[in-house]
Image: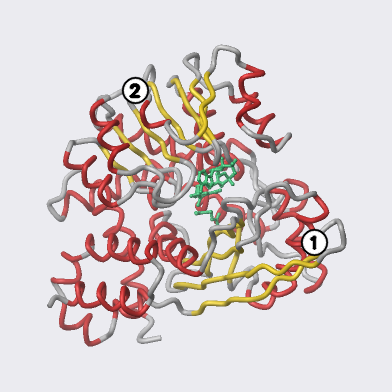
Amino acid sequence: MSYVDEVIEQVTAQNPGEPEFHQAVREVLDSIRPVIDANEAKFRKDALLERLVNPERQIKFRVPWIDDNGNAHVNTGYRVQFNSAIGPYKGGLRLHPSVNIGIIKFLGFEQIFKNSLTGLPIGGGKGGSDFDPKGKSDREIMNFCQSFMLELYKYIGADTDVPAGDIGTGGREIGYMFGMYKRIRGLFEGTLTGKGLSYGGSLARTEATGYGLLYMTQELLKDHGIDIKGKTAVVSGAGNVAIYAIEKAHQLGAKVLTCSDSTGWVYDPDGIDVAALKQIKEIDRARLTEYKNYRPNSEYHEGRGVWQIKADIALPCATQNELDIEDAKQLVANGAIAVCEGANMPTTEAATKYLQDNKVFFVPGKAANAGGVATSALEMSQNSERLSWSFEEVDSKLNQIMVNLYHNIAKAADKYGYKDNFVVGANIAGFEKVLDAMNAQGIV
Ligand code: NDP
Ligand code: 2IT
């Protein structure tokens, strides 16, 4: 059996009940076969792949907190410090009831290659909790975040591990966590990114993931002689990534017809009203059912369904495995040109293959949504030099990073004979830098 297959089997056997982690490992290891096969004996001797798929460290802890009625609750907190070969661990904190160790490991594993692809010095990590922020008061959110940090602070720091936002963790949560970290450690340092602008945050970090996704999509289309202007798009999600993806798509002259949340979805034939979406989701923290109050011509539907609307571009920006084989068939039947992932691993393996087989350009999240973490790394740079850059400066750096990233993955795919296979391109290009750093640092 090949070394790659052996390690895929090991991961499945040694990490039972973690299907998302298996999926992420399978996808990466499968893509990097050409690199591994070319040097199999050495890599096997060095246990290179075993070191790649086993986190350097995984931390699990109890998070007790008290609700507004005085009742105590206990959630589980996680931080997986996956790989520090190219820099301090870096990656978000997810707060969602579905969080478990397998989800955090899949996200941390993806983060290694994503962070490598940004070209910036950041290793891979991820964390979070099964805490559900929905329906909680501000005070309850603060209580939870403070308790979470009371344990997490032991493991993080500006030069060791720098968490950030993800599903359920936005500016408010980062603020509460930062406040508690500073109080415990007595240190005002950039140990979290996505901070508010008044205390060390970076301009354009809020917009970065969504904007970066569109910079990447624009470059992909341009490289194939297609203008994004005038194209239609379907977006899923209505959170941080989705909102700023829609905003930038509109700025670039495309029209976004849909968005969704965990209970339903909106179809707006006139193009999603971003100001209304921000009001509903960022300010009121309400459901998408409210959208119709702003746009009487729009439709609201319960459940899921954005992928059935005919459009040129699909941008999944909600969560993992939200675009399945049936959705992929629908997109192909509707003549979609491209699927670019704003979320982490939103497309199932079967759907990815179907899209690729049917010549739909497919850019995986570890490349397409890397603008968020890249801008987090820019926030770290600004914190280190105790300066803040203008919006234009950060945004133009982000744009350049995404344009370079696109060409790097396209080049890597081409080099190994997989032209326009951006999954192979992203995995190989991301892996090569990590491999080089791991080899240089010996067996650690
Ligand atoms: P948010 O919490 O801001 O928004 C998430 C959105 O997706 C919400 O609209 C939410 O619905 C919906 N959603 C979440 N879980 C589910 C689910 N299980 N089923 C259906 N809908 C769901 O998170 P982000 O926008 O930050 O993150 C979205 C995706 O992008 C995630 O995969 C994340 O890992 C990824 N990502 C985020 C980055 C960032 O900088 N924030 C960077 C790179 C990737 P509801 O409104 O009902 O909660
Ligand atoms: O998935 C991701 O890249 C993020 N949630 C952002 C991580 C970060 O450190 O900014």
Q: Which residue is mark 1?
A: 143
Whole-angstrom CA distance, mark 2 to mark 1, is: 44 Å
Quarter of the image that includes the C terminus = bottom left
**Quadrant placement of the N terminus:** bottom left
Q: Secondary structure at mark 2?
A: loop
Q: Nearer the viewer, residue 70 or 223?
A: 70
Q: Are marks 2 and 1 in contact (CB under 8 Å)?
A: no
- Out of 366 and 269, give the one closest to the viewer: 269
Residue 238 pos. (x, y %): 56, 36
- How many marks the image carries: the answer is 2
The amino acid at mark 2 is: Lys
| Residue under label 2 | 310
Viewer-side residue, 74 vs 229: 74
Percent position (x, y) of residue 432?
29, 65
Q: In the rendering, at what x and y percent does residue 38 appear? A: 13, 71
- The answer to whether residue 114 of the structure is visible from this angle is yes
Q: Earlier in the sequence, mark 2 or mark 1?
A: 1
- Disc on res. 92: none
Q: Residue at x 34, y 66 (%)?
A: 22
Residue 11 vs residue 375: left or right?
A: left
Closer to us: 269 or 109: 269
Q: Residue at x 41, y 45 (%)?
A: 322
